[in-house]
Every structure is written in structure tokens, then in C-alpha cells.
Image: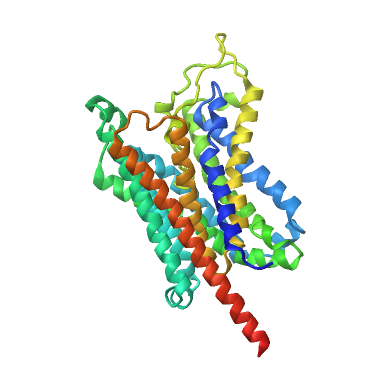
Amino acid sequence: MGANPLLGVFLHWLGGLASASFYVPYRGVKRWAWETYWLVGGVFSWIIVPWFLAGFMTRDLIAVLHEAPTSSLAWTYIFGVLWGLGGLTFGLTMRFLGMSLGMAVALGYTAVFGTLMPPIFRGQFVSEVLSTRSGIIILIGVAVCVAGIIFAGSAGISKEREMSEEEKRAAIKEFDLKRGLLVATFCGIMSACFAYGLAAGDPIKQITLRHGTSTLWQGLPVLVVLLAGGFTTNFIWCLILNIRNRTGYQYLSLITRGHIPTISEEPIIETATDAPAVEIAVDRKEHGDDNGRVPIVANYLFSALAGTTWYFQFFFYTMGETQMGRFKFSSWTLHMASIIIFSTLWGIALKEWKGASMRTRLLVACTLIVLVGSTIIVGYGNYLGATTTTSASKQGGVR
């Protein structure tokens, strides 16, 4: 099956929608601490759903993983662990820089490093990117995406400036620009490790194709390994919090014991590749019924739905990547742009920008316009690349 960049862009948009929306089901979880519902959702995100869909959609999954080079499996897993570390520092970025500036800096680093480093490591950056018209256009699209991220950060900062002094102090209690930028740099680079893990899994993709897997599903076995690495980091951190906060009983208990942390007291582990709208992340109901009973079945169902939705961002990502031809590295830019587009739309739908000044609203509008433009530019660059490749193949056939 040949490359189809238009279909690829559409699939990346679906992935962005899933990433921007996964937090919605968590709003239905009641009387569970963050670490409890995050780990339950994560079991579905990183273990159950990846194995189920890879086993169902691909051929001979176990045999493929058994045949895969140890180095490919190891690096894919390690990059998954490092991506998880990006989540551990994402909360610190928000603490030191605030939600808007922290998100913009972390996302900017993630977009640039996640897009450009894989072709550099493969030795293709100069020969296939800088030396081709289509590659240059894609780089322009990457730059436009970063500009859109800057607009998004500027909109958030503009909104924060319109707050009262009390609201500012409540939002950013520990503002520290120097420390925040250092942490944001680490967070952004670690979050980009997801893209590195997908690149490290290329040998796995080739093996599953030889076993008869459709081109569209070739990335699913890689996700099994990569997300296992992410699960490792998240599991350890959530377990530490369960022990420290004495919330481990919640997985089986129908009754609440003691204090359940509010949203403002909860840690933030989501990586820069999640980036849900602020209101989605914050507006989660904390209370059960008056008797303190926990709707445990509903909590598991909502967490499972959230985790499954989260996984689908990369389910569609791997599909979209197969349609981008030789410039598949540009998939990361499309993914990041799509996440911010749909996160911003969620914020608008949930009235996050209600009462903001005209300047702030214009910045939000610019964010959407510029990011949509970046996906069009990147898609056009891939279209040119696919067209050039097809023409060259035909000429070779004629000769």
C-alpha cells in the first residue's frame, strides 16, 4: 500500500482528538486518589489494550517479539521508561512556570526534539530532509507548529496577567524561571523519547510485516514494548504514592477512609504528549454519596474508558505514520499540533476562556489557525515527497 499523506494527517488528527479527550471519563471517578485512578487507567492504556489490539490486528505477535533483535526490544523499552520520566517532571514544570508557560516550553521542546532527532539518528536528515524541496517544506511546517505553541503559551500568559494578585499567587506559588526552564527542558526531551522509541522499533515493524501483518498495523507490536516501559515508570510512582498517602486500599474498598486529596493537592504526572485542556484536568468531581461509599464499579469503568481513549492516540499515530512515506518523522509534529488544537477546542467548549480579554481571545484564535496551518504545510510536504518517490519509481520502471 502506497503512502497517502492526506489520510495520514486525518489519522493524526484522530490521535490528537483521543489525547485531548482522554481525561473526560476521569471526571466521573469519585472518592479515589489520583494515583489510584491513574494506575487503573494505565493498566488499560499500557498493558491490556495494547496487547489485545496487537494480538487481534497483527500476525503471530509472540513470535514476532521473540524474533525481534534484543537491541531493538531493549531500546524501545528504555525509551518508554524515559518517556515516563518526562511525566514525573511535568508536574514540576507546571509548579515552577505555571500551566501556560510551562506547557508551552515543554511542548516546544517535545515537538522539536521528537520530530528532528529520529532522522538525525538515522543519518537521513541532510540527505533526505535538507537536500529536498519536500523536506524543507516539512521543516517549515515544524517551525510553524512551534510558532503555534508559542501563541498557545502567550494566550495562557495573557489570561494569567488578567487574574488578580491572589489568583496569580494561588496558580503559581513557587514560580522560579531559571529552575523551571531547566526542568521544562528535561521534561520536553524525555517526553520526546516516545518518538525515539517508535524509531527504535523499526526492526520489529519489518518482522511483523514479513509475518503477513498489514502495513497499517505494523506499529502495534512496537507499542506493546514501548508502553511496557511507560507502565514501569508510572507503576513505580503510583505505588510510591499509594504507600505514602495510604490509598492502596482504594482498589478494593467500598468505603472511603480518611482524607481524599483534592485536585490542587494531587500530583501531575501526565507528560507533555497528553496535554489535556486545563478545565478537563481540573474539573473532576471529588465526592461520592453522603455515606462515604465508593462507586467502585463505576470508577473502574470510567478509568478503563479513559485509559482506552488514551491508548487510541498512539493507535491512530502508528496508523498515520505508515501513510507519511519516507518523511514519517513529521508524524510527531502532526501529533503535537493535533493535541493542542483539540485541547484548545475542549477549553473553549468548557468555557476556559470565558471572560478573557479580546487580546487573549485573538491569541487563542491565532493558536488554532497557525497549528491547523502547520498540519497543512507538513501534509503538503509529505504529499510532494510521495509524488516525487512515485515519479522516480515509474521512471526507474521505464528504464
| Quadrant in the picture for residue 324 | bottom right
Name the residue at 30% across, 49% down: 181
Q: In the rendered view of the protein, which quadrant contains the C terminus?
A: bottom right
| Quadrant in the picture for residue 266 | top left
Horizontal arrangement in the rendering, residue 124 relative to residue 265 (left or right):
right
- Nearest the viewer among 397 and 211 is 397
| Whether residue 204 is situated above or below residue 155 in the rendered picture | below
Q: In the rendered view of the protein, which quadrant contains the N terminus?
A: bottom right
Name the residue at 43% across, 51% down: 371
- Nearest the viewer among 255 and 288 is 288
User: For the view shown, which residue lies furthest in the left direction?
Assistant: 165
Q: How many numbered marks does the figure carry?
A: 0
Name the residue at 65% across, 64% down: 205
Percent x, y of residue 338:
49, 49
Horizontal arrangement in the rendering, residue 218 relative to residue 314 (left or right):
right
Residue 187 showing in the rendered view: no
Percent x, y of residue 282:
44, 29
| Whether residue 121 is situated above or below residue 336 in the rendered picture | below
User: For the view shown, which residue lies furthest in the bottom direction?
Assistant: 399
Horizontal arrangement in the rendering, residue 105 relative to residue 385 (left or right):
left
Percent x, y of residue 241:
48, 32
Residue 3 showing in the rendered view: yes
Q: How is the image coloured?
A: rainbow
Name the residue at 58% across, 76% down: 389
Percent x, y of residue 189:
41, 55
- Nearest the viewer among 12 and 83 is 12
| Quadrant in the picture for residue 303 | top right
